[in-house]
Amino acid sequence: MTERAQHLDRRTITASTIIAAGALVLAAIPTAIGMALGGLGAGWVALWCVVGLVIGTASTAAMEAIRLAVTTFRLDDHRVERRVRFLASTTTSIATSRVRSVEISANVVQRRMGIATVKLSSGETDGARLTLASLDRQVAEGLRRRLLADRASADSTEVARVDPGWVRYAPASLMTPLFGLIAVGVVFQVADWFQAVPEILSWVWGRIDDVPIPLLVVVAILAVLLVGSLISAVLFVENWWAMRLDHHRDGSLEMRRGLLVGRHTTLDGSRIRGMTLHEPPGFRVVAAARLDVVAIGVGIGNDENGQTKPSPALVPASPRDVPVGVAESVLGVELPGSASLRAHPPRARRRRQLRALLTTLALTAFALVPALVWSWLWWVPVAVGAVSGAVSAWIASDNSRGLGHVVTDRVVALRKGSIMRRTDVLTRDGILGWNIRRTPFQRRAGLVTLFATSAGGTGAFRLPDLGHDQAAQVWRTAGDVWDHLAL
């Protein structure tokens, strides 16, 4: 059955215009402050802001009206198709039998107006993707049910639901100090647009002139961490508000989450190739972890067509038992514990200790430069050597303790890293093969680095510094044919 071409919902023009107007109003606030600091009169400030708001809002409305006029979509028993006819005609289509992931998202304005954006993707690693923005909410749900057929209504079990208390784990992320630094950078960037940086620095310096430098450094670090923690908490609430993860009987996953932008994603179970458990130092201190799915077409960034890939995140930072339980429920196996992981040879630990020593020596050598120029800075290389030595030694020791792997009848678990500690649990039938890398230093030490090749996630999962006998056991998980790698 072939259906006639349909247009997108016209309410998207109003929704997009409202969102653009809100963004312009938020942008006008720092702009107005900067203009005022630059000495521009209040009347001119108001005029420029109002003119910019009107032009930006009108442009958005006009572009959205044109986009809706030239865009149509069609759905039949075999294909879903989107056609854009403007200066040239562009057609994007996906076979309905190949649709493996359907995501329905709606920001706060779209939800109030009853519309939503639909994103479809096929089962290939970087296969076809198609976005329909926006459709009536009921039409979007009907499209999802039709494309997913029985998967849209199959019996399901709830495997995870967000707990508001989990927000306390958000500041333990590695991104927290980065968020704080970005916030400081944004403030100075906006000030630089209006040549207000000297005034800000003069105002700050006039209040901290008598503060000891060590105390000033500590206060600055705490301020950055505080700002970063607030941003991390806000992002956690926005991304994981009302999160619920269901596991269907056929193996597919269905997730609902989001505050300002609500998302409803369905992922075909046949595309899942494993799970990744993230445990950076901050999470380990509070006994937390985060879980990502390893699946075909799911990952960070854009695919070859420029379309954003569905997020791999399944469970946010939460008590470790929660993501571990979800992984076991989805994969149908018990995740190997730390005690069951096979440790790598002592030579792997010595390599990390050597790197720590070389890093400390390099940083100390750089710190010697100012001390040679100004003798009163003799304490700089001493402090750098002590701090970098302690940090490098801890990272080397922690990395060595975390390095390990285990092979079972169903999965292969690979754990590595310290600052970026992660455990990749890959299903054996999803491993396409193994690649070997051996540096001259590794050959002298009798060590091997393996890369598991999979159609899911990043496509390559690294396990460094195995002994040769260990490597042979691991690469045989892809079949006896891989024994030729021993040569």
Image: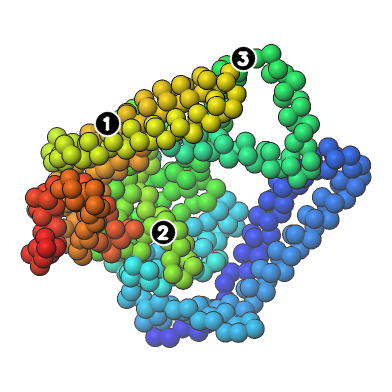
| Residue at mark 2 | 310
Q: Distance between the Cα atoms at labels 3 and 2?
A: 49 Å
Nearest to N terminus: mark 3 or mark 2: 3
Can you tell which of label 3 and label 2 is closer to the viewer? 3
| Residue at mark 1 | 397
Residue 480 figure quarter: bottom left
x and y percentages locating residue 483 in the rendered image: 9, 63
Q: Distance between the Cα atoms at labels 2 and 1?
A: 36 Å
x and y percentages locating residue 59 in the rendered image: 74, 65
Q: Specify the quadrant that holds the C terminus.
A: bottom left
Q: Residues within 10 Å of mark 1 (few under 14, many from 20)?
A: some
Nearest to N terminus: mark 2 or mark 1: 2
Residue 199 figure quarter: top right
Q: Is residue 410 visible?
A: no
Residue nearer the viewer, 239 or 225 = 225
Cβ–Cβ under 8 Å for marks 1 and 3: no
Residue nearer the viewer, 163 or 338 = 338
